[in-house]
Image: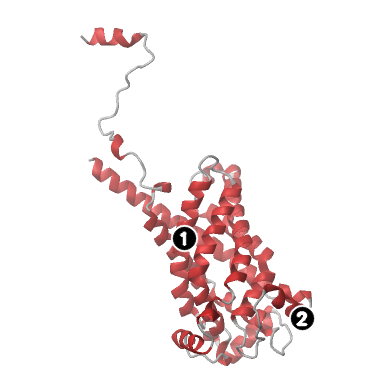
């Protein structure tokens, strides 16, 4: 009988191939993109965002002080002078003023950010996985969604970062006071500017990150193939530094809008980007548009390295968890 069956298929194009005993085709498909569920992307992104911003918060405080001082009747200052001013007026604790607002905003915002990015990246890059335009477009859509969540807490965070001269006692006092005196719109006064800034920032960031990651894979296949920590950290740092340098002028505008009317800073009538740019150039020259570029790059290079390596580590954890779960169901 066995000989007859073998002869039957000997000249056929359809040769039967035996499958291993533990093969189960009905559960061989990954649950989602990269083998992860939507909620797993959100958790990994949330943890990555919080670790990133908490670790680099003092540098962000210095950058904020440098960018708002030019609006007040004070000369622009350098990084060392800004740090000395914070330590003199508020002590070391002044470097962390507003970190509570950052914690409340960074987690949910980054959960939205990375989950939207992963879903859009899969959709845009389905036919061409290494498509930089697809990565950039996915990043832009991700930042539009996440900034809607993060901008109100970013306003609170920056106002508290102004130090003891700020009229707010804490996060909830700031929220209550701004709602009472300026209305809900004050929390989104900089949203348009934030989108205009973060769209090119994110496009440059994600395109650079994916390209750098592929480049590192080509130089060191044994490292890049395994997608080790060093690959994500290096690619993330390069992406963060380049994106930060390109978008510093718009970040100055954003800070001006979020801190307007506080500590003697200018208040803008219509809040247009052109109006703010004109005021900055008039008071501080074109160099005013680059105020805070050094701490901004010092923030985003290591922050992006921390964020991407933490995010990819979180994804790897969930991938192993899902793999173990599938294995247990197969046995």
Residue 227 visible in image: no
Does label 2 or label 1 sit earlier along the sequence? 2
**Badge 2 vs badge 1, beta-carbon distance below 8 Å:** no
Q: Could you say where residue 229 lies in the image, as x and y percent from the top left?
A: 50, 54
Q: In the image, 20: left or right of 280?
A: left
Give the SS element for disc 1. Answer: helix
**Residue 284 shows which numbered tag?**
2
Quarter placement of the N terminus: top left
Q: Toward the viewer: 4 or 176?
A: 176
- Where is residue 201, by image quadrant? bottom right
Residue at point 56%, 80% (across, down): 158
How many residues crowd around disc 1 within 10 Å: few (fewer than 14), some, or many (20 or more)?
Answer: many
Q: Which secondary structure lies at badge 2?
A: helix
Q: In the image, is residue 305 above or below residue 68?
A: above
Choose between 66 and 111: the one closer to the eye: 111
Label 2 crowd (10 A; few <14 / some 14-19 / many >=20):
some
Mark closer to the observer (2, 1) = 2
Q: Residue furthest left?
A: 1
| Image quarter (top left, top right, bottom left or bottom right) of the C terminus | top left
In the image, 90: left or right of 105? right
Give the residue at x 60% y 61%: 199
Q: 35 left or right of 271?
A: left
Q: Position of residue 172 (x, y in %)?
A: 44, 85
Residue 43 visible within the image: yes
Residue 277's place in the image compared with 9, above or below, is below
Q: Which residue matches tag 1?
A: 310
Using the image as rendered, state which of residue 272 and residue 162 is in the foreground. Answer: 272
Q: Relative to 24, is 117 on the left or the right?
A: right
Above or below — where is 320 with respect to 180? above
- The image shows residue 247 at horizontal and vertical percentages of 66, 66
> Residue 220, position in %: x, y?
57, 44
**Could you say which quadrant of the image residue 263 lies in?**
bottom right
């Amino acid at each position: 009988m066995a000989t007859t069956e073998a002869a039957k298929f000997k000249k056929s194009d359809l040769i039967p191939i035996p499958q291993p005993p533990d093969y189960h085709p009905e559960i061989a498909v990954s649950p989602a993109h990269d083998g992860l569920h939507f909620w797993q992307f959100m958790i990994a992104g949330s943890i990555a965002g919080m670790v990133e911003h908490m670790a680099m918060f003092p540098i962000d405080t210095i950058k904020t002080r440098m960018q708002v001082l030019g609006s007040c009747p004070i000369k622009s200052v350098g990084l060392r002078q800004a740090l000395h001013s914070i330590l003199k007026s508020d002590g070391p604790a002044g470097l962390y003023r507003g970190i509570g607002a950052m914690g409340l905003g960074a987690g949910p915002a980054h959960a939205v950010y990375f989950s939207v990015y992963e879903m859009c990246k899969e959709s845009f890059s389905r036919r061409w996985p290494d498509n930089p335009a697809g990565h950039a477009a996915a990043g832009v859509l991700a930042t539009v969604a996440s900034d809607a969540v993060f901008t109100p807490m970013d306003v609170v965070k920056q106002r508290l970062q102004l130090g003891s001269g700020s009229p707010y006692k804490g996060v909830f006092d700031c929220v209550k006071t701004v709602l009472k005196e300026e209305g809900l719109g004050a929390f989104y006064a900089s949203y348009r500017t934030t989108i205009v800034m973060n769209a090119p920032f994110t496009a440059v960031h994600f395109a650079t990150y994916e390209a750098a990651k592929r480049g590192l894979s080509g130089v060191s296949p044994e490292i890049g193939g395994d997608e080790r920590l060093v690959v994500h950290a290096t690619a993330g740092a390069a992406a963060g530094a380049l994106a930060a340098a390109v978008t510093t002028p718009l970040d100055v505008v954003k800070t001006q809008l979020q801190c307007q009317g506080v500590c003697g800073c200018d208040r803008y009538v219509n809040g247009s980007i052109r109006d703010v740019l004109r005021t900055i150039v008039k008071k501080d020259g074109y160099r005013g548009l680059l105020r805070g570029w050094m701490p901004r790059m010092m923030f985003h290079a290591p922050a992006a390295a921390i964020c991407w390596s933490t995010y990819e580590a979180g994804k790897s954890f969930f991938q192993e968890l899902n793999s173990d779960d599938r294995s247990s169901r197969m046995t």
